[in-house]
Image: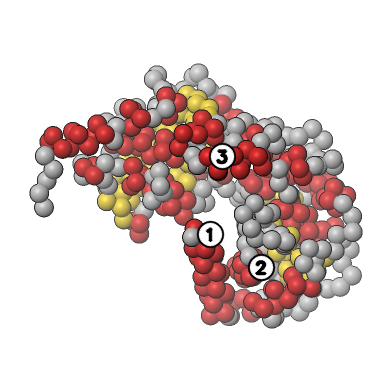
């Protein structure tokens, strides 16, 4: 194949030059910093900023780069293959070869970038890098542990550096980085509207109309770090103090569901939380499967989590869907153990006993659940959904889970449901997983049409 001429290559380089079209805040600051922290709202251009910084590192001779995202899918779908990711922004003359199975990108000059999931901090134990791009650090489940392992591996070259691109949240790891601004951390802040020229006007108007002025909007759009709400039933200090890496032997596990009444754009999410009761008498938050689903999709998701965590029952609020909630679950699995609960008291009254368990150091989060913890630390007895800009769906599911496990005196023993069903029915479990994958993919295709 004929190689492009030098003149053609130079012309493409000039046309695609990032520094000629980037906004000033998307260019790496001068100075001898170790971490460039980009705290900005959704749509600011954080992904493009990170991807272009990686290209500049490659052009500068850096040969080993770590790409770390909240999950393996995020690393692939956003950092590498996304519309503003590394592959889409690379010039044709310096495009890397991507090998998904090896989690590796290789550039023509031999430089290599490897993708990592923050769900697996141990994968970063050992590998060495000259540079790193950490995306959505505030959403990392094992944030501090993963960040520490990444830092231990940034030991190649004369000047190891990292860029962090994230929507800000009031977490310990971000506070630690902010405390070093002016020392070895350079800070860039930004808002969604800073990138208005590259965003659809309809999108910008819609999110401003819905979230402008709300706490969620200040965080997600304006890039503000919001501290705990005065009078909130939970504080980050209390949650952080009891956080653990793994749960002990569990006596019970439940999947709690707070179903949404619709699946339209802008609808509430269906809260799905998995929690367990340990043999030590303490409660543990194990998983958060919350999302915007059609009824069959949330049923499939809940039953998938039921199988994966070997739960003994599903607890679901019936206020919104009545008997249809149980019927939807049984359409997927007729044998599933279901308990319907009815909200006869307000959210704050229901939440207070569970909040007290946290204050008594009786509940731990296994890893971090940023979206759930945001809702918890913003929830006070005078919570106003309109002012907040969202419904506390995750928190509602959490409350139902621990009300079942630790608060309410149980009037009936759990329905007989053999654990061997999960261990011995792999074909059934695989079928449910395939159904979930197919349903979610169909939903995504319909959304993008």
- Observer-side mark, 2 or 3, equals 3
Task: Name the residue at 70% across, 73% down.
Answer: 328
Pick the residue in front: 245 or 335. 335
Give the percent coordinates (x, y) of residue 406: 82, 58
Q: Which mark is residue 447?
A: 1
Give the percent coordinates (x, y) of residue 103: 36, 53
Mark 2 element type: helix
How is the protein colored in the picture? secondary structure
Number of residues whose C-alpha sits closer than 10 Å to that of mark 3, classed few (under 14), some (14–19) or many (20 or more): some
Q: Which residue is mark 2?
A: 295
Mark 1 element type: helix
Number of residues whose C-alpha sits closer than 10 Å to that of mark 1, classed few (under 14), some (14–19) or many (20 or more): few
Give the percent coordinates (x, y) of residue 206: 61, 43
Is tag 1's residue or tag 2's residue first in the polypeptide sequence?
A: 2
Disc 1 and disc 2: Cα gap in Å?
16 Å
Say whether marks 1 and 2 touch (CB < 8 Å).
no
Residue 101: tell me if it is visible: yes
Say whether marks 3 and 1 touch (CB < 8 Å).
no
Number of residues whose C-alpha sits closer than 10 Å to that of mark 2, classed few (under 14), some (14–19) or many (20 or more): some
Left or right of 2? Residue 284 is: right
Disc 3 and disc 1: Cα gap in Å?
19 Å
Left or right of 14? Residue 270 is: right
Disc 2 and disc 3: Cα gap in Å?
29 Å
Q: Which residue is mark 3?
A: 204
Task: Name the residue at 47% across, 24% down.
Answer: 186
């Amino acid at each position: 194949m004929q190689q492009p001429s030098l003149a053609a290559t130079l012309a493409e380089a000039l046309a695609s030059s990032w520094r000629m079209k980037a906004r000033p805040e998307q260019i790496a600051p001068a100075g001898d910093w170790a971490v460039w922290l980009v705290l900005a709202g959704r749509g600011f251009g954080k992904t493009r900023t990170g991807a272009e910084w990686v290209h500049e590192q490659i052009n500068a001779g850096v040969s080993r780069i770590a790409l770390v995202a909240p999950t393996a899918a995020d690393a692939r779908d956003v950092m590498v293959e996304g519309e503003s990711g590394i592959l889409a922004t690379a010039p044709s003359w310096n495009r890397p070869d991507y090998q998904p199975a090896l989690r590796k990108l290789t550039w023509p000059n031999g430089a290599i970038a490897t993708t990592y999931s923050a769900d697996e901090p141990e994968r970063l134990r050992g590998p060495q890098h000259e540079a790193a791009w950490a995306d959505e650090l505030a959403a990392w489940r094992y944030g501090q542990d993963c960040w520490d392992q990444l830092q231990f591996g940034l030991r190649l070259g004369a000047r190891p550096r990292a860029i962090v691109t994230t929507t800000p949240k009031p977490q310990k790891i971000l506070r630690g980085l902010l405390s070093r601004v002016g020392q070895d951390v350079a800070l860039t802040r930004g808002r969604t509207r800073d990138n208005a020229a590259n965003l659809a006007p309809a999108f910008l108007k819609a999110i401003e109309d819905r979230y402008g002025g709300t706490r969620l909007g200040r965080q997600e759009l304006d890039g503000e770090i919001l501290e705990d709400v005065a009078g909130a039933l939970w504080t980050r200090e209390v949650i952080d103090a009891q956080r653990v890496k793994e749960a002990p032997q569990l006596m019970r596990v439940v999947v709690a569901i707070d179903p949404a009444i619709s699946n339209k754009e802008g609808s509430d999410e269906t809260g799905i939380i998995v929690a367990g009761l340990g043999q030590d008498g303490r409660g543990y938050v194990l998983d958060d499967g919350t999302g915007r689903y059609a009824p069959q999709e949330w049923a499939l998701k809940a039953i998938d989590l039921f199988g994966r965590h070997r739960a003994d029952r599903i607890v679901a609020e019936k206020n919104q869907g009545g008997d249809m909630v149980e019927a939807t679950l049984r359409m997927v699995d007729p044998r599933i153990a279901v308990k319907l609960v009815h909200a006869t008291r307000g959210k704050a009254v229901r939440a207070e006993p569970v909040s007290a368990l946290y204050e008594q150091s009786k509940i731990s989060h296994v890893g971090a659940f940023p979206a759930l913890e945001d809702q918890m630390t913003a929830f006070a007895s005078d919570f106003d959904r309109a002012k907040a800009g969202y419904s506390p769906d995750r928190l509602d599911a959490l409350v139902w889970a621990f009300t079942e496990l630790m608060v309410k005196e149980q009037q009936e023993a759990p329905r007989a449901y053999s654990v061997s069903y999960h261990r011995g029915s792999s074909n059934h479990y695989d079928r449910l997983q395939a159904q979930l994958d197919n349903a979610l993919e169909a939903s995504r295709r319909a959304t993008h049409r």
